[in-house]
Image (cartoon, helix red, strand yellow):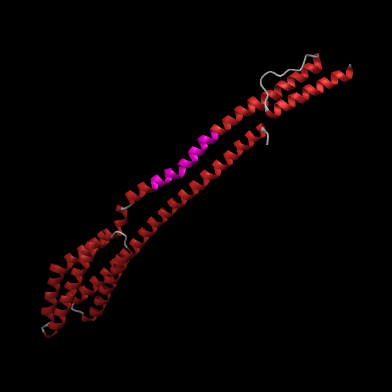
Amino acid sequence: MTGLRKRVTVGFLSIVCLLFFSGMVSFLELSHLSRDTGEILKANKRNIELAKEMLDAAHEQNIALIHLAVFGDRSYDSLCRAELERLENTLLVAQNEALEKSFLDSLAFATTELRLLTDNYLAFGTSADSLGRQQVDSVGGRWYNDEYEALYGRLTSAIKNYMTSTQSSLAPRAEQMKKNAYRAVTPVLISLAVMIAIVLMLYYFMTIYCVNPILGMNKGLGDYLSFRIPFTVKGECKDEMLELKEKIDTLINQSKQSKS
């Protein structure tokens, strides 16, 4: 491969390789960015689902306890136990899936307190069946207002804090995603700068070693054919342009010899 053709080929192959390399790097970084975004959204959605399940269980258990303690309806005993077990099972799932378990400590503590308080009351209610119903209901109403209601408020507050717990981890993860975005764009910017430099170099070499010699030879041939001015080319010719100039000189000399 001769010089001019080699320069042009190397230049364009360099541009193609840079485009391919920067495209692959940007694709990988954007894939990481997309995966991180998906994980954040998935974790947030899962937190909301589990928190909603716990809130529903706590609410149903609270309704059942109101019927038990305030209205003295013992038919809600099984529902109260079932909803409390549902709350604990959901909390266990959340603890197994959570990457950051510190947000669940207060929730687990409130749930344990609720379990103990509820079990104690249910045991008291069972042992007090022999007492007067009106007396038991009066005690149950005071118990609900004085003890259970405040604990229920702490439990629901802990569940809501868990629901929004992913928000606290968004700041560092968003900062990391910002860095990944810059990393995805940086190869493209670097490649763009390098490609601009390569294109300018190609323009320079094409102008110096190809365009200018062709223009010079075209003018020299025109002057020779029109005014019989000796064929000369200003500037330096190399590689294929030099070969072309020498062949034109040879052709002109052969033409002069044939005429003489």
The question of residue 189 being in magenta is answered with yes
Residue at (28, 67) in percent of width and height: 91
The question of residue 126 being in magenta is answered with no
Q: Quadrant of residue 82?
A: bottom left
Whether residue 114 is visible here, answered yes or no, is yes
Nearest the eye: 147 or 4: 4
Nearest the eye: 230 or 41: 230
Residue at (81, 14) in percent of width and height: 228
Q: Quadrant of residue 254?
A: top right
Magenta stretch bounds: 177-196
Going by the image, does 42 lie left or right of 20?
left
Q: Position of residue 229 (x, y in %)?
A: 78, 14
Q: Position of residue 222 (x, y in %)?
A: 77, 19
Q: Position of residue 212 (x, y in %)?
A: 67, 23
Would you place residue 59 above or below residue 5 in this image? below
Query: So how many labels did they put on this image?
Result: 0
Viewport quadrant of the N terminus: top right
Nearest the eye: 245 or 83: 245
Q: Position of residue 54 (x, y in %)?
A: 29, 67
Residue at (86, 19) in percent of width and height: 257
Overall secondary structure of the magenta stretch? Answer: helix
Viewport quadrant of the C terminus: top right
Nearest the eye: 9 or 115: 9
Would you place residue 32 above or below residue 206 in this image? below
Whether residue 160 is visible here, answered yes or no, is no
Would you place residue 80 above or below residue 257 in this image? below
Residue at (23, 70) in percent of width and height: 62
